[in-house]
Image: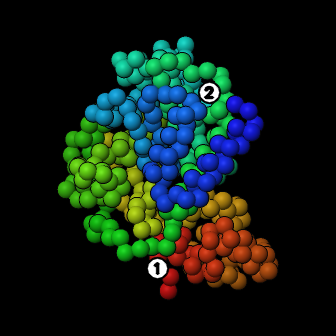
Amino acid sequence: MGKHHVGLRVDAIERLTRDATDSRSLRAELLTMLRREVGFDWYVWVLTDPATSVGVDPLAEIPDRSAIATTIRLKYVTPLNRWTSLDHAARIGSLATESRLWREAQTQYGVVDVASLALRDRYGCWGFIDLWSTSPFTDDDLSVLDSLAPSLTGAMRLTRALSFRAPTAVATPSSGPVVLVLGDDLAIREQARSSEEWLRLILPQPDGSQPIPACAFNVAAQLLAREAGIDDNEAKARMPLPGGHWVTLRASRLDPHNTIAVTIERTTPHDRLDVFGRAHGLSDREAQLVALLGSGVDTTTAAARLHLSPHTVQDHLKAMFAKSGVHSRRELLARALGAPVA
C-alpha cells in the first residue's frame, strides 16, 4: 500500500472518529474499511482497560456465538501473539498449531490464519483486534495493519475520552456491588438477580435479549491467565456506562478452587481519575494535579505538594482544559468524577 493510499485511509479513520458517538458503531465502520484493505472472514475487536489490558467491551463476529465464553478463555490462556506482548501486527500462519485457541476452537471452522493487532500507546492499551481468515494473510496485509495501528489506537482512546462527557439522567441500578460465580470453563454457576440489570447497561443487546456477560468472562479469563503464569496483570477492568457512569469488574478465586467470583461495582473516584487522565492524554504532572484536585485539595495546596508555582499550576490547568474540552476547574472535576456541574 503506497504512502498516498495510507494517508487516505488515515484521513478516513480520523473523519469517522470525529463524527463518532460511541465506540461500537465506530468500530463497525472501521471494520468495514479494514475488510476492504485486508480480507478476513470473522473478527474480534475488544476494548481494554488501559492499565490492566483486560477486555471490557468486545465486538465480535465469530462462527458460533454459543462459543463466546470458550473463545475468550482460550484467547487469554494462549501466549502466542498475545496482545499484551505484541509490538507489531502478527499472524499465526504456520505457527497455528502452537495456539490453543486455533487448535481447540478456530480450526473446526476452516480458519488457517489469524492476524492480531494490539492498540497501545504511551497512555496504555486501548484494545486488540483479531482477524480470522480461511486463507493466509500476506506480509502486505500486516504492513497495512501496522500503518493504521496508530490511528486506530487514537480512535479508541478518543472514544474512551468521550465516555466522560457530562453526566446525564441515565439511571443506574440502585443496588451495590453484584457478584457472578463462574466455573473455570467460564460457565455461569450463580448470578445475583440484580446483576442482569447491570449487564443490560454494560452490554445491551439490540433485540432486547438476555445480555451475554462477556466483560465478566474477560476478567475471569485474566485470572486464569495469571494463575497459569501467562500474564501478571490484575484481573480487573474499568468500563463506561451510558451517561458518564463507570463500573469496575474484578475476578477472584473462590473455594472450591474451580469457581471464580466476578464483582461489578461503581468505579471509585481514584480509578475514574486514572482512566480520565490516560484517555485525555494528560502528562504525568497533569495527572498528579487532577488527582490532588479530585481529592478535594485546593489549587494553592496542590501547588505546594507538587513543588510548583501557582503560575505553573494555572498553565497545567489550561492545558487540561484544552485536552478535555472544558472551560473551568469545576467542569473538569465534574467530568472526571462523574458529578453534575454545580
Q: Position of residue 285 (x, y in %)?
A: 72, 65
Residue 40 visible in this rendered orientation of the protein:
yes
Which residue appears at 68% of the width and 43% of the height?
A: 8
279 vs 256, left or right, is right
Give the amino acid type for the residue marked by disc 2 in the picture. Answer: Asp
Quadrant of residue 301 in the image?
Answer: bottom right
Residue 313 visible in this rendered orientation of the protein:
no
Tell me if mark 1 has few (under 14), some (14-19) or many (20+) residues whose alpha carbon lies within 10 angstroms of its own.
some
Name the front one of labels 2 and 1: 2
Whole-Å distance between the Cαs marked 2 and 1? 46 Å
Give the amino acid type for the residue marked by disc 1 in the picture. Answer: Pro
The foreground one among 237 and 322 is 322
Name the residue tied to disc 1.
340
Tell me if mark 2 has few (under 14), some (14-19) or many (20+) residues whose alpha carbon lies within 10 angstroms of its own.
some
216 vs 235, left or right, is left
The correct choice, above or below, for 117 with respect to 339 in the image is above
The foreground one among 109 and 67 is 109
Q: Position of residue 289 (x, y in %)?
A: 67, 71
Q: Position of residue 108 (x, y in %)?
A: 35, 17
- Which SS class for mark 2? helix
Which residue appears at 49% of the width and 28% of the height?
A: 40
Which residue appears at 68% of the width and 81% of the height?
A: 299
Name the residue tied to disc 2.
141
260 vs 43, left or right, is left
Q: Which mark is residue 2?
A: none
The foreground one among 123 and 209 is 209
299 vs 276, left or right, is right
The correct choice, above or below, for 140 with respect to 4 in the image is above
